[in-house]
Image: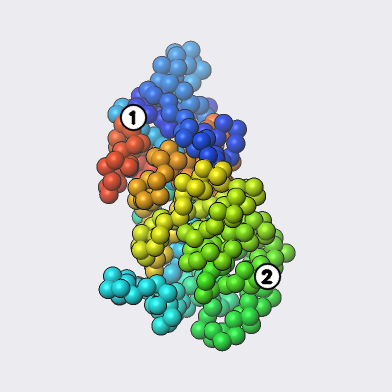
Amino acid sequence: MSGTLLKYIKQLVTVSGNGKQYKIASEMQDVGIIKDAAMYFTDKIEWIGTTEQANELIEKGEMTPNKIIAAKDHSVIPSFVDSHTHIVFAGNRADEFNARLRGATYKEIAEKGGGIQTTVTATRNASVEELFENAKQLAMSAMKYGTTSIEIKSGYSLELEGELKQLKAIKMLKEALPMNIVPTFLGAHDFPKEFKDSPQKYVDILCNEMIPRVAEEGLAEYCDAFVDLGYYTVAQGEQIFNAAKEYGMKIRMHADELADVDAAFLATKVGAVSADHLLFVSDKNIEAMAKAGTVATLLPGTAYFIRMPYAPARKIIDSGVITAIATDCNPGSSFTENMQLILSLSVINMKMTAEEALTAATLNAAYSLGIADKVGSLEVGKEADFIILNSDSFNNIFYHFGINHVSSVYHKGIKVV
């Protein structure tokens, strides 16, 4: 089989799971570094070893590359998996951001009809084509920073036709872009203005009308809900998730971002794949997540952007919880598609090591989306999704912060950046 050989790689960081699709605790420190490495690939990874071994195989006629790339003084890592985003939306909230800089809190802005509701109004008025084009620009920008797999949520219409419009835009992205895209239905992002005084009526509409329709049209793999102070209660979240499971959807959720409301425990109870945010998660619920195998997806960009405490990453990792990190790219509380920035925030402000952050942004994030059998690490048989960095060590992502370290990005063996 003819393919491409990448050799003379200064540092190949495989993040191999060693037979597992995720890493926990001290396992996250082992990122599988091979020096003077080589990787042979087609659309999938066919072989990994050293440059010396590759040269020997070529001499024996056992490897016949049709293209050889010398990656001297470069390092190679798996492409990033951004497992929590909201990039399908319309409108701009720069004015609200400026208000926060002057002291307004996220909660105060929301209580005045701003926040998510601002984006809801703009998104309801946008066409599916407009939503697609806006999200396409963000997705392509994310790719330039090394992301080739991304989860995208709806949640900025809060009514049936608008949510379907967002999900259809996500489907268009999936068909148009060289990325792995995982769609999530987030009709329970907030309560629409029309139901502020009768929230349970909207919960019933979600369960009896919206979820069945989304499932019928096959537009989402996951169902999400914002279970937190001032948003959905634990009881409402449980009702929504049970309805979603009846229609074959898997569960991921916004949990304990603004306060400890036991949302993380609900995640373990309903079998959620991932509980995200967790700024105020309790010690007992960290232990519950570790026992249940629930992924903790931490979003340091949000804590940074809205000036909140960071999630207790050290405690979460040390307790044996499967830990991922993601951008939470959205127009109100974390407007960045740059996973390299998220890695930097993770090590500086959440006290993760470089190895833990890389594992969380690749293999563990892929596991949270159910695609770790295909991406998230550089292992024979997986898709050839990887980044060639313009430095000789992956540690430079963290050391020389605030710049883009990507030299090129590959998805399924094809250079996309």
Query: Mark 1 = which residue?
Result: 71
- Any part of residue 281 in sight: yes
The image quadrant that residue 414 belongs to is top left
Residue drawn at point x = 60 percent, y = 72 percent: 233
Residue 253 vs residue 83, the one in the foreground: 253
- Mark nearer the viewer, 1 or 2: 2
Q: Where is residue 27 in the image (x, y as percent from the top left)?
A: 52, 35
Identity of the amino acid at label 2? Gln
- Residue found at the far front of this picture: 283
Q: Where is residue 276 in the image (x, y as percent from the top left)?
A: 52, 58
Give the label on residue 400, or none: none
Image point 48% across, 12% down: which residue? 60
Q: Assign a secondary structure to mark 2.
A: helix
Q: Mark 2 points at which residue?
A: 239
Where disc 1 sits, the SS reads loop
Q: Determine whether, in the image, residue 208 is placed left or right of residue 301.
A: right
Badge 2: how crowded within 10 Å, few (<14), some, or many (20+)? Answer: some
Which colouring convention does the figure follow?
Answer: rainbow
The answer to whether residue 365 shows anywhere in this view is no
Using the image, determine if residue 67 lies above or below residue 147: above
- Residue 391, above or below 324: above
Q: Earlier in the sequence, mark 1 or mark 2?
A: 1
Q: Residue at x 37, y 65 (%)?
A: 306
